[in-house]
Image: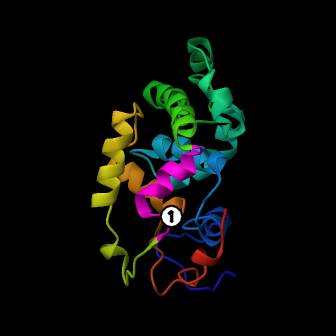
Amino acid sequence: MKNLPRCPWVSTREVDQRYHDSEWGVPCWSDKRQFEFLVLESAQAGLSWRTILDKRAGYAKAFANFDPQKVASFTTAHEEELLQNPAIIRNRQKIQAAVNNARRFLEVQAQHGSFCNYLWGFVDGQPIVNAWRSIEQVPAQSELSQRIAKEMKKLGFKFLGPVVVYSHLQATGLINDHLVSCFRYKQVGKDRL
């Protein structure tokens, strides 16, 4: 699968290609996976996605395999331990945001039945399919990501501004931003995570 036409941001590294080919842009209806991407996307703020992909296994271990119930119970002492963990980004604000966001995530689940119900409600349950022909056309944020970020901020979420939210929407398939020339462009809507 090395010679398939992919989005230009994908490197030749196997981990990048595997992520692009099997996850990025696939509609995600799993709350656990949504929480995982909230943690990873907020950790990525200001850094490259490559850095986060390389630390993904470390994040899974450090954040209770992305179980929001367990992460929500993390104490200040646990946060201090995480600050010493070289397997993740050791940024106090990002670690505290992950714990805070787990608590907010559970509140959204309780109010809406699931986090997916809440998030997919912004797009009436249907992915937005763009038709970008070049990487330069793909925005860093949109009116939708600005609206969702504003709503999530009102709910108490942290480190999830419009750029991070847009990345989250791309990653979890609420927005299909594969270029039309990419082999995954027509496939991702047929898959589901």
Q: Is residue 43 visible?
A: yes
Q: Is residue 116 magenta?
A: yes
Q: Residue at x 49, y 25 (%)?
A: 96
Q: Quadrant of the N terminus?
A: bottom right
Question: Which corner quadrant of the image does residue 67 belong to?
Answer: top right
Q: Residue at x 58, y 84 (%)?
A: 183
**Dominant secondary structure, magenta:** helix
Query: x, y (%) of residue 107?
Result: 52, 32
Query: x, y (%) of residue 33?
Result: 64, 50
Question: Which corner quadrant of the image does residue 193 belong to?
Answer: bottom right
Give the labeled residue for mark 1: 125
Q: Is residue 139 above or below residue 113?
A: below
Q: Which amino acid type is shown beneath numbered disc 1?
A: Gly
- CA neighbours of label 1 inside 10 A, class few (<14), some (14 to 19), many (20+): some
Q: Is residue 145 magenta?
A: no
Q: Residue at x 59, y 75 (%)?
A: 188
Q: Residue at x 49, y 27 (%)?
A: 100
- Near-viewer residue (183 or 13): 183
Span shown in magenta? 113-127
Query: x, y (%) of residue 133?
Result: 37, 84
